[in-house]
Image (cartoon, helix red, strand yellow):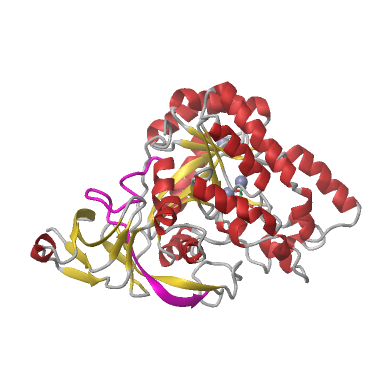
Amino acid sequence: MSTRTLITGGLVITAADEIHADVLIEDGRIAALAAHGSSAARSWSAERTIDATDKYVIPGGVDAHTHMELPFGGTFASDTFETGTRAAAWGGTTTIVDFAVQSPGHALREGLDAWYAKADGKCAIDYAFHMILSDVNEHTLKEMDLLVEEGITSFKLFMAYPGVFYSDDGQILRAMQRSASNGGLIMMHAENGIAIDVLVEQALAAGRTDPRYHGEVRRALLEAEATHRAIQLARVAGAPLYVVHVSAEEAVAELATARDMGLPVFGETCPQYLFLSTDNLAEPDFEGAKYVCSTPLRPKEHQAALWRGLRTNDLQVVSTDHCPFCFVGQKELGRGDFSKIPNGLPGVENRMDLLHQAVLDGHLTRRRWIEIACAGPARMFGLYPKKGTIAPGADADVVIYDPHAEQTISAETHHMNVDYSAYEGRRITGRVETVLSRGELVLHERQFTGRAGHGVYTPRATSQYLGQ
Ligand code: URP
Ligand code: ZN
Ligand code: ZN
Ligand code: ZN
């Protein structure tokens, strides 16, 4: 039996167009669009009609960087796949790409299977995986080929965190050479972790233990240096490169220079770098710990370069790097030693709203909002046009967004499993009203109607951004 849903009267916004159109959904996919009031649209009938008059009808968000249940610093990120994907849905995100982790000394296969098991039957929205490589060796390199065939088409490497996830330049070059031949995309955490560790040791020895020193030792120059080095290694390997969580103006400049040369180099930033700063890291009474993530928050002056990069397409994607740790019991592990504060911020629920506010504030156009939050990440990670757009044949992952509603972000009202909000008290104009995932209502007029297990694992093609 086919089930049809009709969304009428809204402004349909994709990365390419804005049109007043009715949207017909059939069997979980977009069946057709037609101008509102046209004879075609008026001829449609459906079991369910959603009135989107005065609202936006946008593709569900694609958050290409989350860490549900990530083991880090002796603890685990506090959102499970169940709580984290539910919160994502509340915030208008209908696909996440999370990071499966290889443990040093173990196979990629083991790490990946552990992540399949964690997510299986738990997710409210669709999900896919990248693979974190923490031990590049002959065996792992061979496994990369198999993973690409299986739909895990991107691999994160770390120039930071020596002794944990760190890869040296030789390992990085080998992984890049492999990706050049198998079509995978290397995602780089670009910070010079060896130099940072020296500065951490010196800061602690001098009694500088507060959270704000996390930002001071992780110098912008060390992000820029690593970004530059990663780009040169990728050139040598003949491989494309995607730099994750870019925060420093100097790192954006490295990406821009490479792109001006025509190199296939891409960049992502995150809401925390666009909206928060070292002022937050300096909050008294250890409150700054709430804002400890890597790359770190930067002085406010860096934000203009990030917004500019998003407008000029030197940065293509905004994802959250959602990696929540509660203040009580988790962030507190680093009282008296900032280096023991688990790294990461919550945000999977806030991204679409914060970026809508950025539209109202004049940083982005509406279509660029959809590009960097939906279509761009879907293309970058081989999910387009199944995800990231509203077009015939695409999955019916659709958000009805009220651009006039007022809200205040708060831990009191959010749905992430974490005891604080990094954006506490921030006023936002705009709010997610209704969310469909493959045609099923997950959120209906601000009531959660989804369920754990609706979301399915979604294998990915190789990046569709390459060659553009
Ligand atoms: O601080 C962060 N970003 N934590 C998550 C791990 C990572 O490096 O992305
Ligand atoms: Zn093992
Ligand atoms: Zn990282
Ligand atoms: Zn991350």
Q: Is residue 119 visible?
A: yes
Residue 447 coordinates in the image, percent (x, y): 36, 75
Q: Tell which of 240 and 38 is nearer to you.
A: 38
Tell me what residue is drawn at x 44 percent, y 26 percent: 182
Q: Magenta part of the protein: which range?
A: 382-408
Q: Is 377 left or right of 210, judged from the image as shown?
A: left
Establish if 58 lies above or below 460: below
Image side of residue 83 versus residue 33, left or right: right
Which picture quadrant has residue 39? bottom left
Image: 3 above or below 428: above
Q: In this view, does 223 lie to the left or right of 236?
A: right
In the picture shown, does residue 268 fall above or below 232? below
- The image position of residue 209, as x and y in percent, is 83, 58
The residue under the point 68% across, 66% down is: 329
Residue at horizontal 19 percent and vertical 70 percent from the top: 49
Residue furthest to the right in view is 206
Examine the rendered structure and indicate whether residue 68 appears above or below residue 10: above
Magenta segment includes 404: yes
The C terminus: image quadrant: top left
Query: Residue 153, located in which quarter of the rendered image?
Result: top left
> On the rendering, which quadrant does ligand 2 occupy?
top right
